[in-house]
Amino acid sequence: MMQALVATHTLLAAGSPGINWHGFFFLLFALLACGLALAVVLADNVVRMAFYLVLSLGATAGLFFLAGAEFVGAMQLMIYVGGTLVLLIFGVMLTAQEPFVAIRTSTRDKVLAGVVGGALLAVLLQAALTGPAWSGHTAVDASAGVSQPTATPLGMALVGVRVDGDVASGQPSPVDGQVRSGYLLPFEIVSVHLLVVLVGAAYLARTKRRKSSASVRDEALTGVVR
Amino acid sequence: MAEYLIQTVGLPEWLTWSLMAVLSAVLILNLMAGGALVFIWAERKVSARIQDRLGPTRTGGSFGWLQSLADGIKLLAKEDLMPEGADGMLFRVAPYVSFCASFAAFIGLPFAFDMVGLRLNVGVFYVVAVLGLEVFGVILAGYASASKWSLFGAMREAAQVVSYEVPLGMCIVVPVMLAGTMDLVTIGEKQAGWFTNWYLFHDPFTFVVFWVYVTCAVASVNRAPFDLAEAESELVAGFHTEYSGLRWSFFFMAEYSSMFLVSGLAAVLFLGGWNGPVPLATLAGLSEGTGETTGALVRLLGLANLLGKATLGVLIMMWIRWTLPRLRIDQVMTTCLKYCTPIAAAMFAGAMVWLWVFPGGVLNLDDGSRRPGEIREGWLEGPGGRAPAAATAPASIPAEEAVAEVAG
Amino acid sequence: MNLLSDPVGVSHYLVVGALLFTTGVVCMVVKRNALGVLMGIELVLNGANVNFVAFGSPVLRGEQASLLGLDGQAMALFVILLAAAEAAVALAITLNFYNNHATVDVDRADDLKG
């Protein structure tokens, strides 16, 4: 997958006119992401689900790279794939009673969910394909497809300075004349939120206080466990 | 070379670019496989010397040069076993996940001035993120093997690697802060010149951070004394207990190449990257741009420098492995959470203050480009060396100004 | 429409986002394993992220991207962060549930049912 990524960028830099490589790799990653997402739904074994989810999220990170959002893509790989899903698999291991747990769903539920999901998909696709401003995208040739650096403007936005139009300086964006504000407050809120979550999760998942050693010994002797 | 193929040989363009992509991929792949062979041999020799033995002496001459090749052939011929209760698909796929992760991380690592698979604006971040995915292979292997040893190994690995990513990330942020960019090529460039320009010697805080980085790097690639995932005295062989033959060797290739990768990353972040301790090329009046041949020579020198530094890093890891006893899991976590993380955080703050107080650095012989003001001006500078934006007014990024990607 | 030669636009990404979103919703509904439900949530958030990034992407929208600027990517970042936080808390709740009921089947969480 990552090999493909290198190839993409090489090709984008070159701007080869024949095949639209941007489109080609978009298709590749999109098919991977969607196919593996379907596999997540269809799989029964929970670890396999996690594995498919990892690959699906990885392919989505590839899509982000293709869309020029390098920082978000790397973030996706680091936090989502490397952090959250390791946590998930860890959870699976901690809660598995027997090897390869599979809790099955009844066929009736599956059919029902399929119908509902199909309807939802139809609505969403309708919206995606007929939106006035979206369907007629500005044609981007492959040579312009190489992304500009996004990490620095994003980082500046997070500490409250917008390079594309800043409220503090009252300077409107040179592109469209709009004034935008930075993300300092949301950034701080998210930081505090993460801290709270850290403490809260540790509190929720902590082992219960041990009872006095005498009662533990009694339990061990009588074989009675709480 | 691509232009040569298109114009002289007359290949269609799409085929040429695909060929170039495959070529660079094969180069990295060979580096990994060949590197693993050399390092396994070196590990045997190093461990033997440390334990006052000789190590392999017969295969391929008096130093046992061909020992790891012979091992490889043996592994190829070995029967590939899979336990009866194992989850077949995951069991088969796990070694490749590990291998692909460490392979993909190599793409972002610069080997010399512009010898980099893909010059990313977020280079460091990408490398660390992708390297972190290696843990998945290990966890899946441990789970799919349906063996309690493997499962224990995998759980330890999961806990350890996720925890050590925190201090590792903090250590990496320090050179990123000094350089003002996450682009590995730029970080390397900024340390050009004498070895006093290396970020290792930038200030006392970076010096300490480097050693924290070494500790965390050893832990994050599962080398002794942090190799709890495969602690052979407790868990038989940990996560790869049930593996044999070629799949097993994939785990080892992944391990050795990630060792090489974290060493290379240390070299780029702290040890000047491809810039030698003494700027030989600059003293001789050469640079990458002086001409076709000399430019190539300078690049080769840089390549030798980086590979040398990375190999030195790997050798140090071997030295550590054969010297220190393995830690217990609680000691591993204590090292991470009670020592590495606070030290790294304090050093990060310290380096920040230092940068504020001594903007130019202290040991810098040639006062380089590290004044905060200049960093602020140049921070929009893209990989292609785009002109810095206007100094005072918040600048915009013109959408049409695409930055040429440097592809190795 | 030739997908191989046409440039990729926002709607392509929107279709991918819609598919991911729908699979996520179905996953949330169908799975009885609490961790499976969690994975469904991750898929849903991911589908939303694809949309955010597509709308804010200068590569896909060219000049039009300035309508959204960096907002799309910044939103995607916040979504990723909050998803990580949400996963940690949900996992802690699941572990607690498992400690009390020895199962992670969400259909068994019916203690409060009249």
Image (cartoon, rainbow, N blue to C red):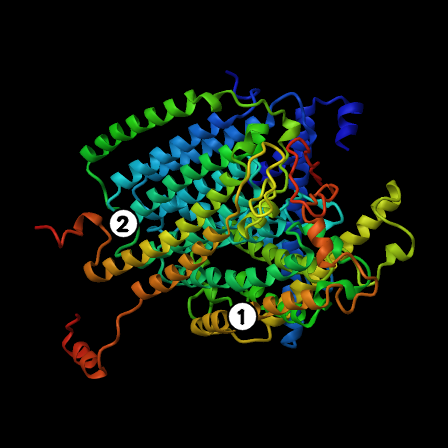
Q: Position of residue B122 (x, y in %)?
A: 61, 48
**Can you see residue B85?**
yes
B370 left or right of A65? right
**In the rendered image, the vertical position of residue A77 relative to residue A29, given as above or below:** below
Residue A181 x, y percent position in the rendering:
52, 45
Tell me the tag on residue B75: none
**Residue visible at 38% across and 31% down?**
C19
Q: Residue A199 vs residue B179: left or right?
A: left
Q: Residue furthest right?
A: B284
State whether discs 1 and 2 lie on one chain. Answer: no
Q: Does the rendering let one see residue B137? A: no
For label 2, the crowd category at 10 Å Cα-Cα, with few meaning under 14, some 14 to 19 and many 20 or more, is many
Is residue B36 or residue B400 the one in the foreground? Answer: B400
The chain letter for the residue carrying disc 2 is C
Residue B105 in the image, given as x and y percentages of width and height: 59, 49
Callout 1, which amino acid? Answer: Cys
Question: Mark 2 belongs to which amino acid?
Answer: Ala
Question: Where is the N terminus of chain B found, in terms of image quarters?
Answer: top right
Task: Check residue B340 in the rendering and tell me which mark sits there, or answer none.
Answer: 1
Relative vertical location of residue A20 with respect to residue B100 in this rendering, above or below: above
Residue count near mark 1 (Cα–Cα under 10 Å), binned few <14, some 14–19, many ≥20 = many
Marks 1 and 2 in Cβ contact (< 8 Å): no
Residue at 63 percent across and 65 percent down: it is B352
As helix, strand or loop, the secondary structure at mark 2 comes to: helix
Q: CA distance from mark 1 to mark 2?
A: 35 Å
Picture coordinates of residue B206 (x, y %)?
A: 66, 67
Determine which residue is flagged by label 2.
C34
Horizontal side of residue B220 vs C83, given as left or right: right
Q: Quadrant of residue A91?
A: bottom left
Q: Is residue B327 above or below residue B134?
A: below
Secondary structure beneath label 1: helix
The residue at the far front in this view is: A170
